Structures are given as C-alpha cells and as structure tokens.
Image (cartoon, grey):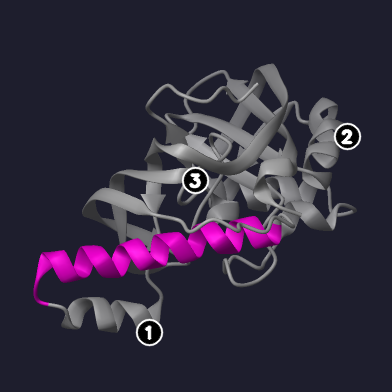
Amino acid sequence: MTASAMRIPLRYLVLHTDRPVTETGTNLRGYIGNKFPEYPLLHHHLDSPMLTYPKVQYKGLGGTPSILGIEEGATVIGEIADGIDELEFRTGRYCVVQKVSYDQKIPVMSVENPIRYRFVSPWMALNEDNYRKFRELSDWKDKKMFLNRILIGNILSMAKGLGIVIEERLSVRTMLEQVPIRYKGVDMTGFSGSFMVNFQMPEYIGIGKGVSQGFGTIRRVNPGISQE
C-alpha cells in the first residue's frame, strides 16, 4: 500500500501530575509496563528502527509525562488510561490530577512541498558502528550528508514498521547540533535541531533508536498540509 493511502490511528495520553516529573521516558515505560504486564506492547524491548517499530512510545517532555499509542497501541492506551492514577518511581510518587487524551487518524504520505519538523527530544542516530564512521569524517559537510542518509533510513524504517511503502524518493535538509545523551547507562552522542522532508508524519512520533523511551520525538514547525 502506498503512503498516500495510509491514515494512522493514534492516541496521545497526557498525564498531568501534582508536580513536574523529573524522570525520563525510560522510567515511565518501566512503571507502566510493570503495572500492566498483561499488555506486551507496553514493555516493548525492540528499540532498533531495523526491528519492529514500537507501537507505544513514552515521553517525558517538559516535566509532563505522556504516552503515544499507534494503531493497536492506541487501543491499549485507551484500555489502561483509567487505571493510571499515580506514577511511582524510585525518586518518589506523583499523583495524576488530570488525564487528557487526543485521538486522531493522521495521514502519513509523501508531499510535494517539504515539511519542517524539529526534534523536541534528542535524535539518537548513531550506533556503535556508524558512530565510528561519523567520527572518522573530518568535514562537517560530509558528516551532515552522513546524518541525512541515516535520517532517511530512519523514516523508511518507521514507515515499514507501520506497513507503509514509500514509493517516492525522500529528500531531507537538516539543521542539527550534537548534544550529549545517556542511554541504558551509557554516555552517547545525540542531535537536536530541525529538518525538512517531503513526507508527512504524525507529530510526537519518534524516529531513530530508543523511540519507545522518548528519543527522536518530532513536532511539526511549518504550516502546510492539514493533519486532520
């Protein structure tokens, strides 16, 4: 099926708590996964974009935890929402004072005019192998082209995981900066900034590695094609 024919059901559950949550999407995933062990989608362990794309993604943006459910993940989020009255981590307990759920069916498709997105959480583009190759490149222009190819690959992998075939050639322009990140207890290099691509994606979906734990979350910047 081509990208132009796909509309992806999403449910975005925002958990407003009695005070800002300092824990990450990793901690949120651990808590929710343990609280509802009967739902395997909630504790997805395949974070590589080359493997099955996570249908439940945990975010910890601006002190407000949230969970994005995609396709069958959206159904699961709807089933567990009433059971989330608090969040408990090693650093303390948070009372959930309000839950806001957004349900949408978003078209995912190639577009004529490029759309600008920004990363609202660091994009984890590099694994052990391509990090070594990235470090060996001395010119930033070469590094940028290298990252552009990885980004296109990440988008293609995301689409494939959602059952979407992208027939048009993707073209990206990036404006990125390196940022330090920590993933599974290891210090790594991530990237912040924005990019433009001739492909429409849902806001707050993740791209790259670690998306189930909130890395690589995107938000649309420029107006253009409606997502309604």
> Up-down: is 199 above or below 53?
above
Q: Mark 2 points at which residue?
A: 79
What is the x, y in percent for residue 167? 60, 58
Task: In the rendered view, tell whether residue 49 sits above or below residue 81.
Answer: below
Closer mark to the observer between disc 1 and disc 2: 1
Residue that numbered label 1 is attached to: 129
Q: How far apart are the two marked residues, 3 and 1, measured between alpha carbons?
A: 26 Å
Q: Which amino acid does label 2 sit on?
A: Glu
- Secondary structure under tag 2 reads helix
Provide the residue span drawn in magenta: 138-161
| Quarter of the image with the C terminus in it | top right
Left or right: 123 in relation to 81: left
* Residue 143 highlighted magenta (yes or no): yes
Nearer the N terminus, badge 3 or badge 1?
Answer: 3
Disc number lying in front (2 or 3): 2
- Identified at 70% across, 52% down, the residue is 2
Q: Are the residues at dot 2 and dot 3 in contact (C-beta closer than 8 Å)?
A: no
> Residue 123 falls in which quadrant of the image?
bottom left
Q: Mark 3 points at which residue?
A: 24
Query: What is the crowding at mark 1: few (fewer than 14 residues within 10 Å), some, or many (at least 20)?
Result: few
Decide which of tag 1 and tag 2 comes sooner along the chain. Answer: 2
The kind of residue tagged 1 is Asp
Q: How far apart are marks 1 and 2 (CA)?
A: 40 Å
Quadrant (top left, top right, bottom left, bottom right) of the N terminus: bottom right
- From the top left corner, tell me how far across and down residue 71 is, in percent: 79, 44
What crowding class fits label 3: few (fewer than 14 Cα within 10 Å), some (14-19), or many (20 or more)? some
x and y percent of residue 9 in the render?
76, 36
Give yes or no for residue 84 being in the magenta stretch. no
**Image spot of residue 120 (x, y percent):** 39, 38
Q: Which residue is drawn at 84% across and 35% down?
A: 80
User: Looking at the magenta stretch, what is its main secondary structure?
Assistant: helix
